[in-house]
Amino acid sequence: MGYTTALHLATIFDTRIEYLRGVGPQKAELLNKELGIFTYGDLLQHYPFRYEDRSTFLKISALHEELEHVQVIARIKKVELLGMGAKKRLVAHVEDETGEMEMTWFKGISWIQKKLPLGASYIFLGKPALFGKKWSMAHPEMEPSSAASESRPKFQPVYSTTDKLRARFLDSRGISRALESLIPLVYSHIPETLPQEILQQYQLLGKQEAMRQIHFPSSLELLSRARKRLKFEEFFYLQLRLLRMKVTRMEKSMGQVLSNTQLLTEFYKHHLPFELTQAQKRVIREMYEDMRSGKQMNRLVQGDVGSGKTMVAFISMLLAIGSGAQTCLMAPTEILANQHFEGLRPYAERLGLSIALLTGSTKKSARKELHEALAKGTLPILLGTHALLEEEVQFNNLGLAIVDEQHRFGVAQRAKLWAKNELYQPHVLVMTATPIPRTLAMTLYGDLEVSVIDELPAGRKPIQTVHRYDKDRLKVFGFIQQEISKGRQIYIVYPLIEESKSLDLKNLMDGYESIARAFPHHPLSIVHGGMKAEDKDYEMQRFVKGETKIMVATTVIEVGVNVPNASVMVIENAERFGLSQLHQLRGRVGRGAEQSYCVLMSKYELSRDSRVRLETLVRTNDGFEIADVDLKLRGPGDLMGTQQSGITDLLIADLSKDAPLLTLARDAAQQLLREDPSLELPQHAPVLRQISQQKATAVNWSRIG
């Protein structure tokens, strides 16, 4: 190992994996491609995803289907080859004193066959499954029964691997052997990355011992402590990065002082159409404090569909305009931008304020006028889509930029918007109707202040949600008929998933025909993603005006038109939608004062997760509770789209399961920065060293190397 000893202490973890004993160039190339393992540091952080208890052995008669992985000691009674071609399999009939079972292999048959002499006794490890009355194990791990008396690790780590790696003897055991070589080599070089005060306060294991125990635990207690230490560290550095960004921004990003409330007072006195909720008032106060502070506001406003975010956004615009600045609001779709425009125009006009809409469909002549008015400063409110980011859109003095449904825009896109004012970075208000669990908000938006509108306007009745099976369809049609006869309108939504577009479209068209047959006297609208934009808008407008009574659609209406008269949302194949999507769709109704309903239609056979999703939706209208369940079911990467930095970069911590630990780590990071914002104190040297070793672009500062 001469190569590694000559290396500088900090770079032993950068040693290429091929130099590890037993790996070599060919296996190294596979590890690079299959698992993204290039260096010693990468392998050290390829953590086991579970552990097998190798201390207990079960008798065949004691097996049951709840068991995950078990060990049995059994003697080989008979070996046979069954099936032909692709269905060929090797079956070993084995027995102990309590019964018989089968061991089955579908791959590597000729190699395994040589290892199965009759009468030999082996330890078999795998997941038991019952076929008829006989127990079976597919592709079990096996070793001679004499190993049972050897002193070997009680808890065997299990590592993720791939078929290509298995073919080169890099199955879980092979990876485990590589780590057995690596850990003694690097153990003394593993630096402590947390200050002693934090280790003591939170009773955390040292980094070296945590790394040893995570791979080869001596006991369940030490394994639990190793996991806690490594998860805490990951969260700590993630939060430290976000909090430092926030501090840097607060120091560097001066904001215009927008404190003139004259225009706002006029609106409150003469034009406010309804009493604001306490939650809306609280959020407006928080924004006002930010906007008059002289520091740039960076605030996320979360609120369920219908909680009044748009009114809060308009009031923040009035604060900016009253103080001589311009404002803009960027939405992810033309439909949504249009809806904001139609909703806010009457208020702007009553106050004598110019308001304009800029989307991909805006005519060239209108654009020219709009650009001139913006540059002069005579246009105080501009609403639009991505078109707002174009080079030629230049403001005279942009003071406030509002982004709706922020997770649909990338960081680079938003940065273009902030650059529209050269003197001051505009104040930023980000709005989302997708409730984000607190743990996720702390991680995704840890550098933003978060406000929550957790109250619906007075007079809104909670939507009643029911789950019905396909066999109940006639009853559901009867209910729809009753609602239409009361003068209400109905949405019927079908899934449209990319992978099965043609099948989904057929379901939509079949559904449309059966609804047309069931309601021959009621005009229908149909909207789906395959239609031209103008055809979609035409159909939407007919429904908005009440010319059609039933809107049959795919999820294009998920974020879109506001039809107060629509009181029923029927979601077909509801088991195929995600929880947050179901919640968003449900929020399309319940916009008026009438009682609204959501009917979830599904087939009878449902997976466990599908059943949990539908039961959650029936039980609660609380978007945050729904988001928490969604996080547990789907995991953070899927919930927000994997492009969200930092989320999918976590190696061991799990946002959906480790929320209490995240809170502790954030507290620790905040405390550290309060005491020592520049990390100059000698006791914080490990933190400074760890950060400075990471690349400027690194998201996860807790990594080794």
Image (cartoon, rainbow, N blue to C red):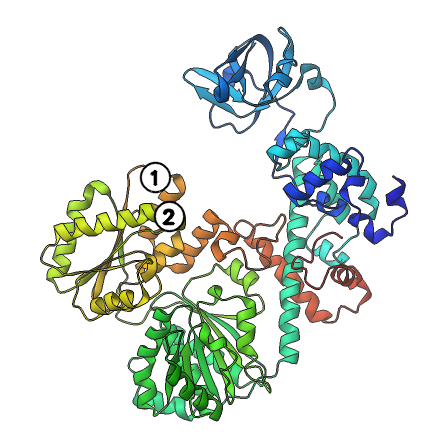
Write the residue at 16% across / 68% down: 547
Q: Between 5 and 410, which is closer to the camera in this rendering?
A: 410
Query: Can you identify the residue that label 1 sits on?
Result: 606
Q: Disc 2 to disc 1, how far (Cα)?
A: 10 Å
Q: Secondary structure at mark 1?
A: loop
Q: Between 612 and 550, which is closer to the camera in this rendering?
A: 550
Write the residue at 72% across / 43% down: 43
> Who comes first in sequence, dot 2 or dot 1?
1
Left or right, 315 with reference to 51 = left
Q: Position of residue 255 (x, y in %)?
A: 57, 84
| Number of marks | 2
Q: Is residue 8 above or below residue 610?
A: below
Q: Position of residue 498 (x, y in %)?
A: 40, 50
Q: Which mark is residue 444?
A: none
Quadrant for residue 175, please give it: top right
Q: Is residue 428 above or below residue 489?
A: below
- Mark 1: few, some, or many residues within 10 Å (few <14, many ≥20)? few
Residue 392 shows up from this direction: yes
Q: Is residue 605 above or below residue 289?
A: above
Number of the front mark, 2 or 1: 1
Write the residue at 62% across / 77% down: 250
Residue 222 shows up from this direction: no
Identify which amino acid the numbered label 2 is placed on: Arg
Query: Can you identify the residue that label 2 sits on?
Result: 613
Identify which amino acid the numbered label 1 is placed on: Leu
